[in-house]
Amino acid sequence: MEENKMILSQRIVNNDNTKENDLFKEYIINVENYSKTHIFSNIERGIISTTFKEYLYDVFDVSNQQELIKKINGEWKLILEDGIDDFKLNETKKIVTIYYGDYKMFYYNKMKTKNSANAIKMLFNDDKVPPTSQIADIIAKIADRSDALNFTLNEKNVLAKNIPTILMENNIKLDKDDIFDINKVSIREVIEIGRKILKNDRTVLKVLGTKEVHKEETWQQYFERYGNYLLFGNVRLDPKICLNKEKTKELNDKYPDIITCNRFGFLDIIELKRSDMFLFKFDNSHNKLVPTSTLSSALSQLNGYLQIIPYAYETQKAKDQGLECASGMLLIGDKDHLVKENETLKKYLNDNNLTMENIKYEAQKELRKLNYSYSHMQVVLYDELIDTLETFINNIN
């Protein structure tokens, strides 16, 4: 490529004999097409640009222009080649080879950084409007580095609140696959929070705004926030607003924890109990598992709601939609609270060479039988509900 070669040599131009080209003694440029202004501030006099000097800081392992001038000291030759590759230093011959493609990426990133900084300054000045192209570049870079960014909960809330505003104000429509992926992330967060409640992880208290992890109130807040995911889109109704108090007097001013309307127009009445409540206990007189008083009482309470709530709606329209048809769900306990362990049970296990795992398996069968015995009620474990949601999201590509 001899015809494309360009050679610039140092020249002494000042009265005090200082060299105006004070870096390299010679430049050899073997690049067919390149932007001279990206490299030189004055090509005729061999004066290189500030940006190219900054690129050379890493090449010569220096941190400023004075150190660069001192290190090169007019003794080095620079060769500029086509392509993208790492620079090459020949300390013996004092030759450095730079690849234009690599420097060009550095140059454009430098310019983008400068433009982005100016755009951000303009954002905070209400009298100016930054170029939208630069704002788009900033957002694209944030997305590119998002895996390295660890936002706090408050910061996530700020982003969640403001990103939809950007989309709506500018009539930006997300691709349906993007929307689905965002929802998958949201659902995984719902699953994670639910598992933390089961583990009595106090970090959920700040998220849900409650004081004690094991209280029913925590599950109440969890379902109020994420019920659409957990109950697969059923519409939540407010019991205290939609029910006629005169018709619910038998309930002593008590209301179900959650009432939803499914896609068929039927009511689902949901009662929440603590996840650390036991479902069964061992009856040594019959050597079998029987429901605990907590479980029996909760089922009785739910059954009472089913007898009254469907007929206590304020509007005729609700009845016309078939809302008097209702089913009940009791959420209570988890797999670790199927059976309450006591001395009588331990003795039975030892006498019959059984383990707690054997008893838990029997308890799951008893729970299945119990659910079969009710036509309009079912008992669901909290971890089973969360597992169902997780299985659902994992099975969707």
Image (tube, rainbow, N blue to C red):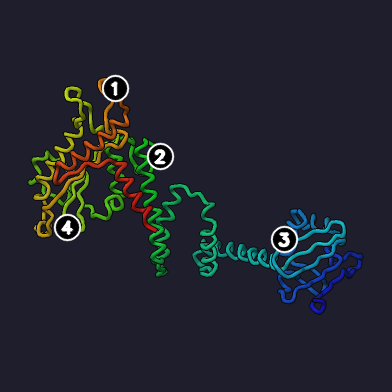
Q: Residue at x 42, y 60 (%)?
A: 163
Q: Which residue is mark 1?
A: 346
Q: CA distance from mark 4 to mark 1?
A: 48 Å
Label 1 near label 4: C-beta < 8 Å?
no
| Measured Cα–Cα span from mark 3 to mark 1 | 71 Å
Q: Is residue 125 rendered to the left or right of residue 179?
A: right
Q: Looking at the image, can residue 28 be seen?
A: yes
Height in image: 299 above or below 87? above
What is the quadrant of residue 200 in the picture?
top left
Name the amino acid type tagged 3.
Asp
Q: Look at mark 3 in the image and give the residue it sits on.
A: 86
Q: Residues within 10 Å of mark 2 (few under 14, many from 20)?
A: few
- In the image, residue 369 lies at what x, y percent? 19, 39
2 or 1: tag closer to the N-terminus: 2
2 vs 4, front mark = 4
Q: Which residue is mark 2?
A: 203
Query: Relative to 37, is 251 above or below?
Result: above
Alpha carbons under labels 2 and 3: distance apart: 47 Å
The secondary structure type at the circle numbered 2 is loop
